[in-house]
Image (cartoon, rainbow, N blue to C red):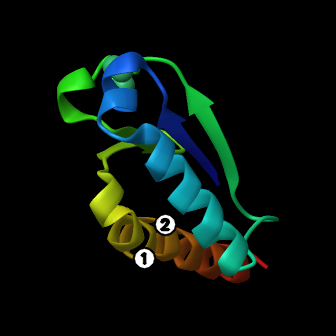
Amino acid sequence: MIITVCIGSSCHIKGSKQVVEQLRALVAENCLDHLISLTGAFCMGECMNGVCVKIDDAMFSVQPENVETFFNTEVRSRLVDSEHQARKNK
Ligand code: FES
């Protein structure tokens, strides 16, 4: 899974640095470094909805105060789904 956080100027003003730091900490705390690549990108063209975060190709609007909720609902659920799918395909 690739999580891309927009670090363009509009998203930066809205807290992209804090979002990156919190995501990095949550990935490390949950020992998910081997499953999640955290990366940055410049403007994703959705400045009104920043901080823009993509999980693979799906776009989300995340604020520093809801990173943990985003992580638990969107990131974890996708990891569980992909693990479930991998088991089914064995
Ligand atoms: S600066 Fe983040 S979408 Fe434009």
Q: Amino acid at mark 1?
A: Asn
Please give the name of the residue rendered at 55% of the width and 59% of the height, measured from the top-left corner: 23
What residue is disc 1 on?
72
Using the image, determine if residue 56 lies above or below residue 80: above
What residue is disc 2 on?
75
Which image quadrant: the C terminus?
bottom right
Residue 82, horizontal then vertical, whole percent: 60, 70
Whether pointer 1 and pointer 2 mark residues with C-beta atoms closer than 8 Å, the reply is yes
- Identify the element where label 2 is drawn: helix
CA neighbours of label 1 inside 10 A, class few (<14), some (14 to 19), many (20+): few
Residue 12 falls left or right of residue 35: left
Using the image, determine if residue 17 lies above or below residue 29: above
Q: Amino acid at mark 2?
A: Val
Viewer-proximal residue among 53 and 68: 68
Viewer-proximal residue among 87 and 68: 68
Residue 50, horizontal then vertical, whole percent: 28, 35
Residue 11, horizontal then vertical, whole percent: 35, 29
Using the image, determine if residue 44 lies above or below residue 2: above
Residue lying furthest left in this view?
Answer: 48
Which image quadrant: the N terminus?
bottom right
Please give the name of the residue rendered at 67% of the width and 79% of the height, measured from the top-left corner: 29
- Identify the element where label 1 is drawn: helix
CA neighbours of label 2 inside 10 A, class few (<14), some (14 to 19), many (20+): some
Residue 10 falls left or right of residue 81: left
Please give the name of the residue rendered at 30% of the width and 64% of the height, measured from the top-left corner: 66
Residue 71, horizontal then vertical, whole percent: 45, 68
Using the image, determine if residue 38 lies above or below residue 75: above
Tell me the distance, in whole angstroms, between the alpha carbons under discs 1 and 2.
Answer: 6 Å
Q: Is residue 58 visible?
A: no
Q: Is mark 2 within 8 Å of ligand 1?
A: no
Please give the name of the residue rendered at 63% of the width and 66% of the height, measured from the top-left corner: 25
